[in-house]
Amino acid sequence: MFQPFRFGVQLHDPLPGTTWTETVREVESLGYSTLFVPDHFDEGLGPIAALAAAAAVTDTLRVGHLVLDTDYRHPAVVARELATIDLLSEGRLEVGLGAGWKATDYQRSGIPMDRPGIRVDRMIEHATIVRRLFTEESVSFSGEHYTISDLSGTPKPFSPGGPPFLVGGGAPRVLRFAGSFADIVGVNPSIHSGEVDQAAAQDGLPDRIDQKLRWVGEGAEARKDSKSLPDLEINAWLAAAQITEDRDSVAVLLGELFGVPPEVGLASPMALVGTETQITEDLQYRRERWGYNYPVIPGAEARNFAQLVGSLAGT
């Protein structure tokens, strides 16, 4: 049994020729489930303020971060800001958290970029504290990176038990944690170098995704809330998305990006290219093989994918 399809769109800025208010209302009208905003210092609007503004002028559109870097903000601050968005939007928030990967964010801001293991440790503590502040009257926590003493999380979210959590990553420990903790898992390439390079692209090829889903499943087996892997939503951030009659030409470019034959690059769940019929077949195959039900369309392609979104969402 698979989760029904729903679609997000990721935006850094308003669509061309529109304001942010006009953009998010258009995204809602096109049938997208969720508006996502990334969290990089050199990309567009501030993610917390942008989502608060989006939620304030829409009625059904969900809002989320893909994803907040937990190195940039203390969990007590994040919990309060996000609980406020969830409360004021009457339960339309998705909490996206990650351990950070983009080296230039750290270099240009002066924030120390610790080795991956430390960043993951900090993210796990951060996510645990945020969820507890959402759900418990008073929280005390003593960890390697954070200490919380008898803190009441206020306000409480609108959603019973708090909003759903999306944890994204590509390495074993992050994906096992996501499987054990999150409601939505972003199964992505692992970006060890701090930039999207060919090694990162190749980590998004099908055989690597097979292994990543095994790690998610191992985490899901340890859950205490009886959720299993089929209960989780699997989120796909798309590096390339295009509706085109000339799939072969785009496949050549993807092959160069991935450093593999063109047909292999097309098979990556990080790419979604072809006619609407071809893309529909790809999405159905990926859901059957890996569980991907929640693709995130790049903002520049939001209008072009609207018809496909309308035909597949909820099925």
Image: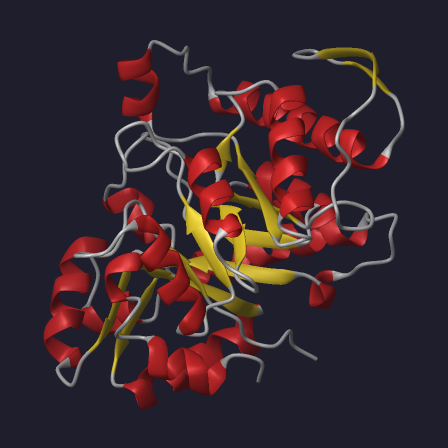
Name the outermost residue toward the bottom.
277
Q: Quadrant of residue 5?
A: bottom right
Frontmost residue, 295 versus 303: 303
Name the spot of residue 227 as percent of width and height, x first: 80, 59
Left or right relative to 35: residue 102:
left
What's the residue at 62%, 54% (across, down)? 92
Name the spot of residue 25 as percent of width and height, x first: 40, 62
Name the spot of residue 31 as percent of width and height, x first: 45, 74
Name the spot of residue 295 as percent of width and height, x first: 45, 65
The quarter of the rendered structure image containing the C terminus is bottom right
Frontmost residue, 220 versus 79: 79
- Image vertical order of residue 138 relative to residue 205, above or below: above
Frontmost residue, 141 versus 87: 87
- Image vertical order of residue 98 relative to residue 153, above or below: below
What's the residue at 77%, 61% (across, down)? 228
Q: Quadrant of residue 307?
A: bottom left
The quarter of the rendered structure image containing the N terminus is bottom right
Number of numbered discs on residues: 0
Note whether residue 246 is visible: yes
Note whether residue 269 is visible: no
- Image vertical order of residue 263 relative to residue 67, above or below: below
Q: Quadrant of residue 276?
A: bottom left
What's the residue at 79%, 53% (across, down)? 221
What's the residue at 53%, 20% (across, down)? 73
Frontmost residue, 127 versus 139: 139
Left or right relative to 257: residue 192:
right
